[in-house]
Image (cartoon, rainbow, N blue to C red):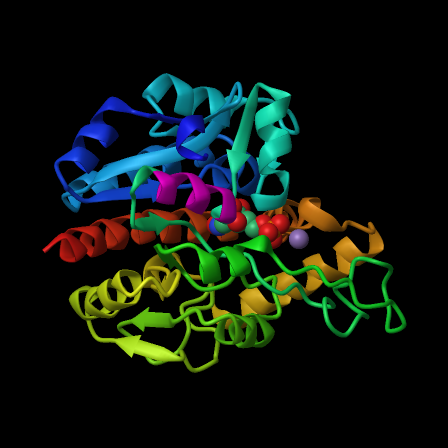
Amino acid sequence: MIAGRLTVATDVGEALDLGRPVVALESTLISHGLPYPSNLEVARASEAAVRESGAVPATVAIRDGRLLVGLDAAALEELATAPAGSIRKASRPSLAAALAAGGWAATTVSATMIAAHSAGIRVFATGGIGGVHRGALTGGAGSGAGSVGDAPPTFDISADLDELARTAMAVVCAGPKAILDVPATLEYLETRGVPVVTIGQLELPGFYATSSGIASPLVAATVEEAARVAAIHLDMGLGGLLVCVPVPEEQALPGDAARDAVEQAIRDADEARITGPDLTPWLLARIAAITGGASVRANTALIENNARVAGHLAVALGR
Ligand code: PSU
Ligand code: MN
């Protein structure tokens, strides 16, 4: 049983008992997605944004064989300041091993959904979900297996996608990460029955950029409208859904700058032969270097914004 592995923070447990809105936050973006001190700043800012929206934040991580749902200030700081590489990245396939190993592990979207859902949380905010990596289906560039065209397909598809299909939660993000094959990620989500609802614009957000250039499968004018769809999908037990919100305009990267940085980073990852769970953190760090930190400002802004919207969504779902 998952519940037997949970350590739920007191304020989170009280809110859940009283039926008050709670928003789960993940920890891989803290340990693997962003450099210190931006990671700690955004972790704190996200919790504050959830509170300002009228909900209780529950950052999820693993420590000493327990799934922590809600971290105190000291735990958050420990996680954010741990030396690079000292914290495991736990997703569904690596969750049991991370629990068995003891010590700290950070939870990805899939592992956070498993813990938060078991605790009774229905809304979760992240930055950008994982998805179908470039070269996953076609091989060649982006496959991580060397720079050019004859590399075989990698089948590198994030466990986030199947988790969305099976676990009933609304996950708020700024779109699939721009390092991915975004059209293939959308098709995969459709095949697995996951609604993708964008709030406030017709196009799917592009993570660092406000738009991906691809039409969103579903559009909601307001958070309340998205909440009505989420409530029905979750109540019918149809699994999870993805709610997309664009990065705030002021911190967004221009679409072409984001595209150039992503393509350069993917070429570099191919050359360095980076594959598997290391690929996403490696690409994010490389894009930060290429953009002189502009991607980190966009990433932190979108994470905090998603936390705020998730808070409003949780409040609306509670009505
Ligand atoms: N959003 C961010 N930065 C991140 C992530 C999301 O802004 O680092 C993390 C999430 O934890 C997500 C993971 O589940 O990246 C995807 O990793 P992979 O592609 O290896 O499945
Ligand atoms: Mn992968």
Between 111 and 225, which is closer to the camera in this rendering? Answer: 111
Overall secondary structure of the magenta section = helix
Q: Position of residue 198 (x, y in %)?
A: 33, 71
Residue drawn at (19%, 53%), measured in percent from left and top? 312
Residue positioned most to the left: 319
In the rendered view, does 168 fall on the left or right side of 193? Answer: left
In the rendered view, does 222 fall on the left or right side of 256? Answer: left
Q: Which residues are magenta?
A: 110-118
Say if the magenta span includes residue 1. no
Residue drawn at (69%, 44%), measured in percent from left and top? 278
Residue drawn at (29%, 42%), measured in percent from left and top? 120
Q: Is residue 249 above or below residue 305?
A: below
Residue drawn at (62%, 65%), measured in percent from left and top? 132
**Could you tell me if residue 291 is visible in this image?**
no
Q: Position of residue 114 (x, y in %)?
A: 45, 44
Q: Position of residue 86 (x, y in %)?
A: 64, 24
Q: Quadrant of residue 77?
A: top left
Q: How many marks?
A: 0
Q: Position of residue 157 (x, y in %)?
A: 64, 60
Between 146 and 38, which is closer to the camera in this rendering? Answer: 146
Q: Is residue 108 above or below residue 100?
A: below
Say if the magenta span includes residue 113. yes
